[in-house]
Image (cartoon, helix red, strand yellow):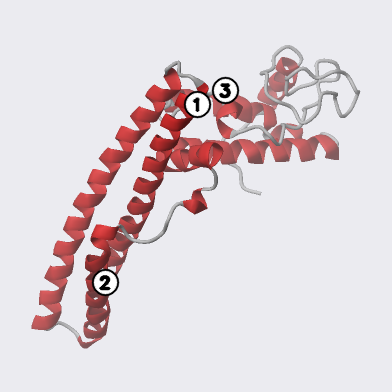
């Protein structure tokens, strides 16, 4: 199991963590309404108010809710990091090394979920893909075919790359250098297209956030949100394909 880095906990910090656990907590959806250890009622707190045992997070908890964030695509990344380290000091296995196996297992599960949530939300692209999964089904539904207007160019590019690979082992030649220049030109054009996609994606992020902050009738909100989500899906698909082509060019031609 791999955990994201956290400032190393000293003995004093561990004792302080145990003391604070009796007085502080953050409300998050729990896996059950009763403490697994003492059967006391658990009202949305990750530590039991009676026996101070850590509680398992609900399997229905999404990454945004874990960090108590609205489903927005432009978020305060410093606040995200701050919350991550706060929760890490509650769930991290280092604080449960002397506890019983049940608490160790719960801390491992909660910490793994927290790490996955943080990795996803701190990256804008992963954040958008995750939101699409939440709002409009699996990201795997995003098509993987090249953009229609690039299809012919992609076929030509693949042929050129194959020719370059065949010529390269024979060393420098006029044909090889001419083909290298041609491929570098294609790469530059693809990189410009990729930059425009990034701009379009940022525009969609803004559209989504504005919709989330508006008061709309349920049917109207869903229709407008679906339109934005489909637009993001299209851009993400095209972006992935073009990025892979650029990487292929870089790897082949240097």
Mark 3: which secondary structure?
Answer: loop
The residue at which mark 2 appears reads as: 155
Q: Nearer the viewer, mark 2 or mark 3?
A: 2
Quarter of the picture containing the C terminus is bottom left
- Residue drawn at point x = 72 percent, y = 32 percent: 58
Please tell me which residue lies in front, 130 or 84: 130
Q: Nearer the viewer, mark 2 or mark 1?
A: 1
Q: Is residue 109 left or right of residue 157?
A: right
- Name the spot of residue 180 as percent of width and height, x first: 16, 72
Whether 121 is drawn above or below 180: the answer is: above
> Residue 60, located in which quarter of the rendered image?
top right
Name the residue beneath numbered marker 1. Answer: 219
Q: Residue at x 74, y 27 (%)?
A: 30
Graded by Cα atoms within 10 Å as few (under 14), some (14 to 19) or many (20 or more), the crowding at tag 3 reads some
Say whether disc 2 or disc 1 marks the residue closer to the N-terminus. Answer: 2
Q: Alpha carbon of mark 2 to alpha carbon of mark 3: how far?
A: 46 Å
Q: Position of residue 154 (x, y in %)?
A: 26, 67
Q: CA distance from mark 2 to mark 1?
A: 42 Å
Evaluate whether residue 214 shows in this view: yes
- Looking at marks 2 and 3 on the same chain, the residue that comes earlier in the sequence is marked by 3
Question: Element type at marker 1?
Answer: helix
Image location (x, y in percent) of residue 11? 70, 27
Could you say whether the residue bearing mark 2 is in a helix, strand or loop?
Answer: helix
**In front of the other: 13 or 61:** 61
Tell me which corner region of the image, top left, top right, bottom left or bottom right, holds residue 165: bottom left
The residue at the point 30 percent across, 57 percent down is 147
Q: Which residue is mark 3?
A: 68
Q: Residues within 10 Å of mark 1 (few under 14, many from 20)?
A: few
Q: Does residue 196 lie above or below 226 as drawn?
A: below
Q: Are marks 1 and 3 in contact (CB under 8 Å)?
A: no
Whether residue 93 is visible: no
Q: Give the residue at x 60% y 28%.
A: 66
């Amino acid at each position: 199991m791999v955990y994201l880095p956290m400032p190393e906990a000293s003995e004093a910090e561990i004792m302080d963590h145990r003391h604070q656990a009796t007085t502080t907590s953050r409300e998050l959806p729990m896996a059950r309404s009763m403490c697994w250890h003492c059967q006391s009622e658990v009202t949305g707190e990750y530590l039991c108010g009676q026996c101070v045992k850590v509680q398992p997070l609900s399997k229905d908890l999404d990454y945004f809710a874990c960090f108590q964030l609205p489903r927005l695509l432009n978020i305060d990344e410093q606040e995200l990091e701050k919350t991550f380290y706060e929760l890490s000091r509650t769930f991290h296995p280092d604080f449960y090394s002397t506890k019983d196996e049940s608490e160790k297992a719960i801390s491992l599960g909660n910490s793994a979920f927290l790490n996955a949530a943080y990795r996803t939300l701190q990256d804008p692209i992963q954040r958008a893909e995750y939101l699409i999964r939440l709002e409009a089904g699996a990201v795997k539904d995003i098509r993987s075919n090249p953009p229609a207007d690039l299809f012919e160019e992609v076929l030509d590019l693949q042929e050129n790359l194959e020719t370059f690979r065949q010529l390269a082992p024979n060393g420098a030649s006029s044909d090889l250098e001419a083909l290298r220049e041609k491929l570098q030109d294609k790469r530059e054009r693809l990189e410009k297209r990729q930059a425009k996609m990034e701009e379009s994606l940022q525009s969609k992020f803004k559209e989504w956030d504005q919709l989330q902050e508006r008061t709309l009738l349920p049917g109207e909100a869903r229709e407008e949100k679906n339109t934005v989500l489909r637009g993001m899906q299209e851009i993400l698909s095209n972006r992935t394909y073009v990025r892979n082509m650029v990487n292929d060019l870089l790897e082949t031609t240097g």
